[in-house]
Amino acid sequence: MIQRQSKSQPKWTDVKAKLASFDRAGLLGLVQDLYAAHPDNRTFLHTRFGLGEDVLEPYKQTIDRWLWPDAFRKQDTSVANAKQAISNYKKAVGDPAGLAELMVFYCEQASGFASDIGYQDESYFDALVRMFEQSVATANTLPTDTRDALIARLDRVRSTSHKCGYGVGDDMDSILAKYTKRKDRPSQRR
């Protein structure tokens, strides 16, 4: 007799129940198949296990691609895809320093692209300002030397963003003032 499958979508608990019957070799084979199936799976595993010279590089490449596209190839921007790279890193390992580095890199790429080509997209700028605030907040949780280096980079982003319009630089001025003490913050030169 054929069993009818439930009409609901399978969930993690269903997968977990199936995995319980696997032996070590079966689990390794499954992970190997997942590794071979998609580059994102390889990136995840490399990051989780700290393999490779720079585990942040694949995430930075994704952020760069979607925030600073090649205009000659008629590539589009995608804030969602760039943010997804950060989310994927967070799921893989979630190291606060690596997370802050990716967020600051996001801000550098977004403000650099907008400034360089005169890109004018309000939703792109809104996402940049939100990421800027998350970056400053995350950087402030790190040890002083790491934090100060990231805040200095964010201060350059703030300065560059004054060229964007839409009040982006002004919003960043307020955010930086909110999260950092005036005496500790790099000077706000434009």
Image (cartoon, helix red, strand yellow):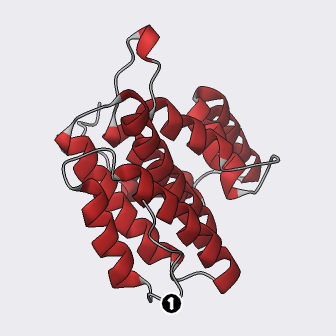
Residue at the (48%, 58%) spot, across then down = 103
Residue 128, above or below 119: below
Circle 1 sits on which residue? Answer: 183
Q: Where is residue 149 in the image (x, y as percent from the top left)?
A: 64, 70
Q: Residue furthest front?
A: 190
Residue at the (32%, 65%) spot, across then down = 172
Pick the front one: 30 or 109: 109
User: Identity of the amino acid at label 1?
Assistant: Lys
Q: Where is residue 105 in the image (x, y as percent from the top left)?
A: 54, 51
Q: Quadrant of the C terminus?
A: bottom left
Residue 184, above or below 37: below
Q: Position of residue 100 (x, y in %)?
A: 54, 65
Q: In this view, does 188 lie to the left or right of 184?
A: left
Residue 131, above or below 133: above
How many numbered circles are shown?
A: 1
SS assignment at label 1: loop
Identify the image quadrant of residue 4.
top left
Pick the front one: 98 or 113: 113
